[in-house]
Image (cartoon, rainbow, N blue to C red):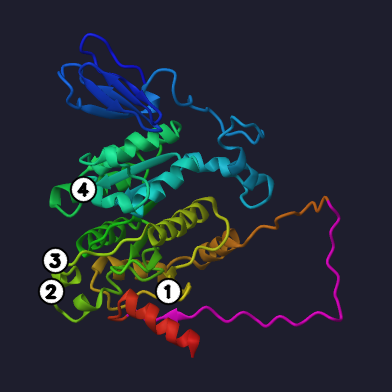
Amino acid sequence: GKGGKGGKGGDGFGGQIGYGDGGYSDGYTGGYGVVDGKSKGKGKAKAEWRPKVEVEGLGRKKIAEMSMEVRDDNPYSRLMALKRMGVVENYEKIRTFSVLIVGIGGVGSVVAEMLTRCGIGKLLLFDYDKVELANMNRLFYRPEQSGMSKVDASLATLKGINPDVEFEAYNKNITTNENYEHLLGRIKNGGMDGKSPVDLVLACVDNYAARMTINQACNELDQTWMESGVSENAVSGHIQTMIPGRYACFECAPPMVVAAGEDESKIKREGVCAASLPTTMGITAGFLAQATLKHLLKFGTVSNFLGYDALGDFFPTYAMSPNPDCGSNQCRKRQQEWKDRPKEAEREKKAEEAPAELHPDNEWGICVEESTDAVATPEPPEEPKVDTKGTSVADLMASFKKLSSG
């Protein structure tokens, strides 16, 4: 970058450093450093970090429609190839969906970036924490963003990645009464048209109170959501799909401390620094983003519960039935509604969930013939259902692993 004259600061671009009489600014890839020209002497000038798209001539322009055209300057060509290959029926529909994410930390920030790169229509981001240098062992955030609120830092990065995505950011703690009402309002009216509900809520929080708040809101509004978490020792994680009434809610299978009637504050031990690996968080975020795409675009199977044990390379998946004695009145209400739903609607739902034939035209003329040497394939085991009464997710994973190895 070139240094300014007469006390003006320099502008740094793309990893270079700009020097000026009044100080210097660091320019990072994807960002633009702006120096406060009032600074005097050799001291470091105050820099404001902004995304490239705010600087004239940098970044890309908005794209009106997704195209399947294979070009080096088409950011959607490889995503649209999913449609051409028969994986997704209509990938362009991704632009019609809005997703609300609570918790923009080690998992939530990466999920937000993945969905932004995939061309999601709208993201609503909730967090009240700030970026710290202690977060730099994770993905997404950069050292120069230290001190910024996580939602502001996320906006700066995500807008630079894909200007086609709409964003709403709220630096709020959802567990307070006032902010809970705001969360309810954005779930109910955060859709693309500003009136309809969001299509999915993702919980990427690290505490019991926030999970219970999201659980209460989604049960109250009959809103499908997905919960995620990474263990304190950083070597296991999970995602869980919550469809009110159909699957167990978060209160159906509370942590053991809560199920035993003890103080919920014991869940997070005072003075203990939780371990954190970008690998485990990245894998969990990938699972969550993938499940989000499958749920929204209707392809593949979305597991009710999917776990990850890094030490044993173990990936348990199973269904968790709702607890008829759940402490949530709203959950019990949704369970009854699910039981009373019209059976015709359920048959239509199963028909929608049935995987489509990938290549019905068979342009290469491939056919499958029986072989006498073929080995019979055993029937896949029936997916187990787990009783959730008073059992934590961690205990369920441990029990299921014992069953699998027995």
In terms of secondary structure, where does tag 4 sit?
Answer: loop
Mark 4: amino acid: Asp
Q: Which residues are magenta?
A: 364-388
Q: CA distance from mark 2 to mark 4?
A: 24 Å
The residue where tag 3 is placed is 271
Kindly identify which numbered label has been placed on residue 311. Answer: 1
Q: Is residue 22 above or below residue 340?
A: above
x, y percent for residue 151: 27, 41
Q: Quadrant of residue 74?
A: top right
The N terminus lies in quadrant: top left
For the residue carrying disc 2, how many other residues have a C-alpha within 10 Å: few (<14), some (14-19), or many (20+)? few
Image height check: is 405 above or below 22? below
Q: Give the residue at the far front of this rendering.
A: 42
Residue at position x 56%, y 30% in the image: 65
Gap between marks 1 and 3 measured at Cα:
25 Å
Instruction: Confirm whether the magenta stretch covers residue 369.
Output: yes
Please indicate whether residue 166 sits to the left or right of residue 274 in the image: right
The three-letter amino acid code for the residue at tag 3 is: Gly
Which of the marked residues, 3 or 2, is nearer the chain's N terminus?
2
